[in-house]
């Protein structure tokens, strides 16, 4: 950045920050706060002066800036009001402005995001700031993501949302999912070449709390997480962690981990709307993730297999014919969408088998035949690999009242 351009950039950010302070925030008196209209992406920033050189790039090449998008600002404002943290002072201290331009703003660099959480946490006078931020977290600034979340059939389907976190939220925040019945693990991670930022404790706690918060929103009847483990030491009284997470929390673990029971991932969610969910996923993939037309093919393939289970018995050629594609074209386009035929079929067979065993009246032999298995033994073997128990045991659990929590 040239010495001539820096004052101009700082002056513009200061003007925008002052305008924001006068119009949308009040920390006087009772500490009431006017919440900004939810409008933009979670960690969006903005480019106050494109020629200023203040922007940097994330690990995946995303342009980043020193301003905050309105949606993220609204979340920070609400969390700060709940905890007594002085957001206005923190934004001024970090020289952060407010994005006011059209379009999706750039992201905050990881260094600034960590500094923002550190300062807001240190200034909190009533509880933990990161937990308050998790409690108000939402995707209202991205309606397709919000629709995908609330219309999911089960928690297993929401694995995709966690896989999209680098694109939807921030490129340096990631989740790894491991599902090996009877257990399932979720590993949050902050990726950075800087040791101070890699698995930054406050960011890890925020990611963990947001994951738990989302689970509570879509499946309030389930105790999805039964243990939380952090690599770092406690940043507050350990009892506060257990009270917030509602389960045992340990520290100095080998890896950041949320532990749960695999069978809970298949319970039917109250807001399940499969058609709306498929449409939301297609919108996300095409317009947010930039996958082009390939994801719509995946959605159409899933729709056909659900509506016409006989296609499971017809193999790749049968599904390709139903889609009016050559089998090699179908394979290629599935690869372009990050899928393959075997994985697609296995996932849908698993989901449909769980649904039929929980909610249907078909006997197990008939379910296996409907899903394209030649004999009960092969269906039982496949289901046991997916679920960690044979279909007969799964159905008994469902009928005894545990199946919808599995």
Image (cartoon, rainbow, N blue to C red):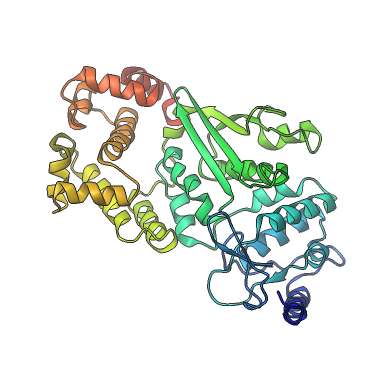
Rendered location of residue 85, percent (x, y): 81, 56
The C terminus: image quadrant: top left
The N terminus: image quadrant: bottom right
Q: Work out whether 187 lies above or below 369.
A: below
Q: Is residue 406 visible?
A: no
Number of callouts in the render? 0
**Front one among 300 and 53:** 53
Rendered location of residue 351, percent (x, y): 33, 35
**Front one among 306 and 327:** 327
Q: Work out whether 325 lies above or below 189.
A: below
Residue farthest to the right, as pictured: 29
Q: Is residue 273 left or right of residue 63?
A: left
Q: Quadrant of residue 22?
A: bottom right
Q: Quadrant of residue 82?
A: bottom right
**Front one among 11 and 81:** 11
Residue drawn at (71%, 49%), measured in percent from left and top? 132
Q: Is residue 163 left or right of residue 109?
A: left
Q: Work out whether 144 lies above or below 34.
A: above
Residue farthest to the front, as pictured: 2
Rendered location of residue 348, percent (x, y): 30, 38
Q: Is residue 59 visible?
A: yes
Rendered location of residue 283, percent (x, y): 38, 60
Residue drawn at (72%, 28%), measured in percent from left and top? 252
Q: Work out whether 186 lies above or below 217.
A: above
Q: Quadrant of residue 339?
A: top left
Residue drawn at (35%, 23%), measured in percent from left and top? 385
């Amino acid at each position: 950045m040239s010495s001539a351009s820096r004052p101009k950039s700082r002056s513009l950010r200061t003007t925008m920050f002052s305008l924001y302070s006068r119009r949308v925030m009040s920390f006087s008196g009772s500490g009431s706060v006017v919440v900004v209209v939810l409008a933009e992406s979670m960690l969006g920033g903005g480019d106050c002066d494109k020629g200023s050189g203040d922007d940097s790039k994330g690990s995946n090449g995303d342009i980043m800036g020193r301003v905050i998008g309105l949606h993220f600002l609204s979340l920070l404002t609400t969390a700060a009001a709940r905890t007594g943290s002085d957001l206005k002072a923190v934004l001024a201290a970090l020289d952060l402005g407010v994005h006011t331009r059209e379009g999706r703003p750039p992201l905050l660099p990881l260094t600034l995001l960590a500094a923002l959480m550190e300062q807001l946490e240190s200034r909190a006078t009533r509880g933990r700031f990161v937990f308050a931020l998790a409690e108000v977290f939402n995707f209202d600034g991205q309606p397709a993501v919000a629709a995908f979340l609330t219309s999911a059939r089960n928690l297993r389907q929401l694995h995709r949302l966690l896989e999209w976190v680098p694109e939807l939220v921030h490129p340096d925040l990631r989740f790894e999912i491991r599902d090996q019945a009877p257990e399932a693990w979720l590993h949050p991670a902050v990726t950075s070449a800087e040791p101070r930022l890699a698995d930054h404790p406050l960011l890890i706690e925020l990611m963990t709390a947001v994951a738990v918060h989302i689970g509570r929103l879509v499946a309030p009847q389930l105790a999805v997480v039964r243990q939380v483990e952090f690599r770092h030491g406690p940043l507050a009284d350990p009892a506060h962690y257990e009270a917030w997470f509602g389960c045992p929390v340990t520290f100095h673990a080998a890896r950041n981990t949320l532990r749960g029971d695999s069978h809970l991932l298949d319970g039917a969610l109250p807001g399940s709307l499969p058609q709306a969910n498929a449409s939301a996923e297609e919108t996300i993939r095409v317009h947010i993730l930039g996958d082009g037309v390939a994801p719509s093919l995946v959605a159409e393939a899933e729709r056909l297999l659900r509506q016409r289970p006989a296609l499971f018995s017809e193999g790749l050629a049968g599904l390709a014919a139903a889609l009016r594609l050559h089998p090699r074209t179908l394979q290629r386009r599935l690869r372009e969408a990050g899928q393959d035929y075997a994985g697609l079929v296995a996932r849908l067979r698993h989901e449909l088998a769980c649904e039929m065993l929980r909610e249907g009246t078909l006997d197990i032999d008939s379910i296996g035949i409907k899903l394209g298995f030649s004999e009960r033994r092969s269906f039982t073997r496949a289901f046991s690999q997916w679920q960690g128990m044979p279909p007969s045991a799964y159905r008994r659990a469902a009928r005894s009242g545990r199946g919808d929590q599995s």
